[in-house]
Image (cartoon, rainbow, N blue to C red):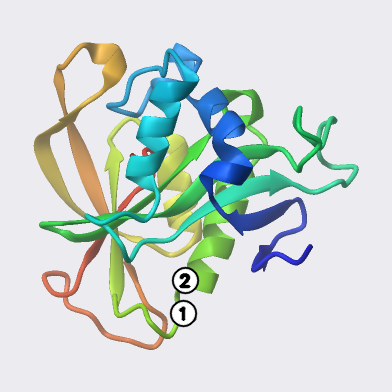
Amino acid sequence: MSYPIETPRLWLQPMTVEEHLDDFWELWTDPKALMWTSQGIQESKEAALELMLKVLPNEENPNIDKFALLLRPVAENPMPYTNAQGKPKMVGMVGTNRMSDHGLETGYCMNIKYWGRGYAGEAFAAFLKYYWTLPNRTEFSLVAKVDLDNIPSQKILTRVGAKRGEILKDFYARFIDGGKKRDIECWYLERPGTVASEKETGAVFEVSEIP
């Protein structure tokens, strides 16, 4: 099978319910994995399916792109490379999310079992390079909205050339905080070869949370 995006350790494949539901559910079963998200754990496969349908292209957000991060069978990756169905193991996802007042949102989510291996940065850099080449995507810039304490995501954005912007006060609430509001910082990414205003045609990249 060919994949639209490949990195040294990962294949990126358009995410679908048919191919990736079980691995998607696994992402949302460990409370420790929800440090930077407002979403709670998914207690059942049915609940995971409901959430998955919201993050995939749908009537409300038809023009979004979502990719599953799949392990390649290479020595640098932990075994097994496949899931219970014998398909390449999905260890996370990356893509655009929804239109908002700030523009088109985007982000990633990783299975906590695979944290600390550099997969998120590897996948996001590859996704970003691919996204800028799509002829039917008109966004000139992306804006990353990141919790002030989310240092790993800030490092990823620095590596891909994002520029720090304003801080939005009391912007969101983490699941683990029980509704307590937290601040986030905006990081700006511009399409290569364009000059976009910070106030125009922006999009949001929520580094720490896809839904």
Which residue lies at the image location 50% right of the left edge and 15% below the top edge? 30
Q: Residues within 10 Å of mark 1 (few under 14, many from 20)?
A: few
Residue under label 1, please give it: 134
Q: Is residue 188 visible?
A: no
Left/right of residue 184 with respect to residue 89 in the rendered view: left
Looking at the picture, does residue 139 appear above or below residue 66? below
Q: Where is residue 165 in the image (x, y as percent from the top left)?
A: 21, 56
Q: How crowded is mark 2: few (under 14 residues within 10 Å), some or many (20 or more)?
A: some
Give SS at disc 2. helix
Q: Where is residue 125 in the image (x, y as percent from the top left)?
A: 55, 61
Please state which of residues 150 and 68 is positioned toward the viewer in this rendering.
Answer: 68
Give SS at disc 1. loop
Q: Is residue 182 visible?
A: yes
Residue under label 2, please give it: 131
Looking at the picture, does residue 168 appear above or below residue 173? below
Q: Where is residue 126 in the image (x, y as percent from the top left)?
A: 58, 63
Q: Where is residue 119 in the image (x, y as percent from the top left)?
A: 63, 44
Please state which of residues 61 and 122 is positioned toward the viewer in this rendering.
Answer: 61
What's the CA distance linking mark 1 and mark 2? 5 Å
Which residue lies at the image location 41% right of the left edge and 19% below the top edge? 42
Looking at the picture, does residue 89 appear above or below residue 33? below
**Marks 1,2: beta carbons within 8 A:** yes
Q: What residue type is disc 2 on?
A: Tyr
